[in-house]
Image (cartoon, rainbow, N blue to C red):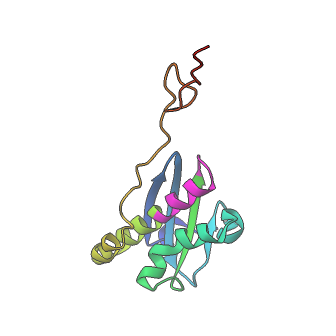
Amino acid sequence: MSTKSEYLGYGTGKRKSAIARVWIKKGDGNIHINDREFQSYLCRPTLGILAKRPLTDLGVSDTYDIKATAKGGGVAGQAGAVKLGIARALLNMDEGLRTSLRSGGHLTRDARVKERKKYGHKKARRGFQFCKR
């Protein structure tokens, strides 16, 4: 098991109701989420591409190893949380990457969450069917 001292950066990412804690260190491009390979954990290839986007945009996907723990929400929310966590960990490691990460849109938290159900409605906006007779 790795010690804390060998990790170069740490970042926390959030998306919907998912939270991911991400640690980054020098390595050969391995990504583990909850002690599993990220392709097997995220199931869909598009989610894997989404989670790796900060690394691929900087061209350092084969330079760093990523260890992440994700909880809450669903798989898509966790992939978005891991993406933000990776971007913040890279920023924590090297402040000079801020402009390239910001221009790629990787440091912006996606604040969209599910809208609450309203009283007198079936769902958030869908009302009950009206019947005149």
Please state if 129 lies on the left or on the right of 58 as rendered: right
Q: In the image, is 20 to the left or to the right of 45?
A: left
Query: Which residue is depicted at the point 47% across and 78% down?
Result: 55
In x, y percent, where is residue 115? Answer: 47, 37
Q: What's the magenta region?
A: 71-83
For image coordinates 48% across by 81% down, the residue present is 56
Q: Quadrant of residue 30?
A: bottom right
Q: Main secondary structure of the magenta part?
A: helix
Q: Residue furthest top?
A: 133
Q: Quadrant of the N terminus?
A: bottom right
Name the residue: 54% across, 68% down. 51
**Residue 62 location, x and y as percent?**
54, 86
x and y percent of residue 6 in the render? 50, 73
Indicate whether 4 appears above or below 128.
below
Q: Answer above or below: position of 55 versus 132.
A: below
Magenta-drawn stretch contains 73: yes
Q: Nearer the viewer, residue 44 or 38?
A: 44
User: In the shown orientation, is residue 117 left or right of residue 110?
Assistant: right
| Residue 93 within the segment the image draws in magenta | no
Q: Residue at x 50, y 66 (%)?
A: 23
In the picture, which quadrant includes the C terminus? top right
